Image: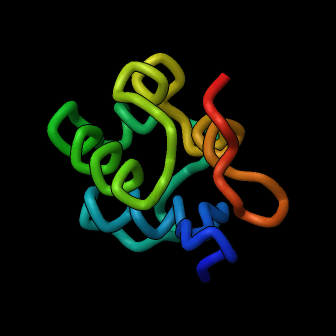
Amino acid sequence: MVDTAGQQAFTRERLTRDVADVLYVDPSEVEPAESLIEQGLDSIRLMTLVEGWRAEGAEISFVDLAERPTLDAWFELLGTPTGVPRARR
């Protein structure tokens, strides 16, 4: 889904799917409130996510995500109810 500004929507489902892809698991296996590091996310995979999302308009950094490594926290940073990326604070 693309908004009128051309940015990819960062819905919870999309974030879950992207994380699952880099972890090579089914999206249903990603626990949104649990540490993604404990679920197998390493710095290389995190950088892959950051770079991909930044290319699509997300204004986030590696540190933004590494400081709070849960899917729930990332959705707070990247998503809104409509899935449009939030501006960096």
Front-most of 25 and 46? 46
> Which residue extends farthest front?
5
At a point 69% along the width and 43% down the height, the residue shown is: 86
Residue nearer the viewer, 80 or 31: 80
Q: Quadrant of the C terminus?
A: top right
Spot occupied by residue 33 in the image (x, y as percentages of width and height): 64, 39
**Residue located 66% across and 65% down the image:** 11
Q: Quadrant of the N terminus?
A: bottom right
Q: 19 above or below 2?
A: above
The furthest residue to the bottom: 1
Q: In terms of image quadrants, where is residue 76?
A: top right
Q: Identify whether 1 is placed above or below 6.
A: below
Q: Is residue 70 left or right of residue 79?
A: left
Left or right of 42: which side holds 3?
right
Question: Where in the figure is residue 58, as x and y percent of width and height?
Answer: 50, 48
Extreme residue in the left direction: 44
Could you tell me which residue is drawn at 24 percent across and 39 percent down?
Answer: 47
Q: Is residue 53 above or below residue 25?
A: above
The colour scheme used to paint the residues is rainbow
Q: Position of residue 3 (x, y in %)?
A: 67, 75
The total number of labels drawn is 0
The residue depicted at 42 percent of the width and 38 percent of the height is: 36
